[in-house]
Image (cartoon, grey):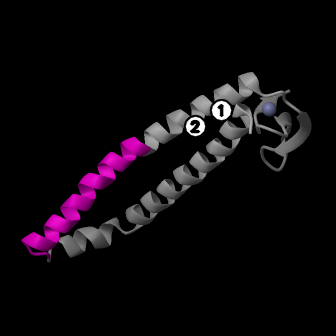
């Protein structure tokens, strides 16, 4: 496997990981009220468990940010090193306006035209 191909697949893996992290974060955010309500009735030991989780959540935000940084580095790398195979496509911005773009069939880089 050449390195460009490796990074293409590695970036897809990172994108999945980023999306999963975001989905979990949304799930937690949606349940914040219930969490807060439940926390009020917890004893010290139970509260300690939730506290550990809260600490982990704040470090996972940094983890998510760093994952995105790495993913963007790979995107730039692919843009610079791929032997692009461009396809022209039309995307709808809204019902009245559409825009022509080019995307690469290998690395999925896009370019406005
Ligand atoms: Zn490409």
Crowd around label 1: few <14 · some 14–19 · many ≥20 (10 Å):
some
Residue at image position (45%, 37%) is 66
Disc 1 to disc 2: CB gap under 8 Å:
yes
Residue lying at the far right of the rendered structure:
88
Q: Where is residue 60 in the image (x, y as percent from the top left)?
A: 37, 49
Asked if residue 59 is among those painted magenta in the image, a careful observer would answer yes
Q: Residue at x 57, y 46 (%)?
A: 14
Q: Furthest residue to the front?
A: 1
Q: How many labels does the image show?
A: 2
- The residue that mark 2 highlights is 71
For this view, does 81 lie left or right of residue 69? right
| Whether residue 49 is situated above or below residue 6 in the rendered picture | below
Q: Determine whether 69 is above or below 19 in the image.
A: above
Is residue 56 shown left or right of residue 23? left
Q: Is residue 99 magenta?
A: no
Q: Quadrant of the N terminus?
A: top right
Front position in the image: 14 or 94: 14
Q: Give the range drawn in magenta.
A: 42-63
| Secondary structure character of the magenta stretch overall | helix
Which residue does the image show at 19% across and 67% down from the upper left? 49
* Horizontal relation, residue 9 to residue 98: left or right: left
Find ligand 1 in the image and state its quadrant. top right
Examine the rendered structure and indicate whether residue 33 appears above or below residue 106: below
Q: Which residue is drawn at 77% across and 39% down?
A: 108
User: For disc 1, does the CB lie below 8 Å from ligand 1?
Assistant: no
Question: Residue 95, how many percent across, how many down?
Answer: 82, 50
Query: Residue at label 1?
Result: 75
Disc 1 secondary structure class: helix
Residue 100 lies, in percent from the top left, at 87, 35
Secondary structure under tag 2 reads helix
Whole-percent x, y for residue 11 in the image: 63, 42
């Amino acid at each position: 496997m050449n390195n460009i191909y490796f990074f293409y697949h590695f970036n897809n893996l990172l994108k999945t990981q980023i999306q999963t992290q975001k989905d979990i974060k949304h799930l937690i955010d949606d349940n914040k009220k219930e969490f807060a309500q439940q926390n009020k009735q917890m004893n010290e030991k139970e509260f300690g468990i939730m506290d550990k989780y809260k600490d982990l959540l704040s470090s996972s935000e940094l983890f998510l940010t760093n994952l995105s940084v790495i993913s963007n580095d790979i995107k730039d790398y692919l843009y610079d090193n791929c032997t692009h195979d461009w396809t022209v496509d039309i995307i709808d911005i809204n019902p009245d306006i559409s825009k022509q773009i080019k995307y690469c069939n290998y690395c999925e880089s896009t370019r406005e035209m």
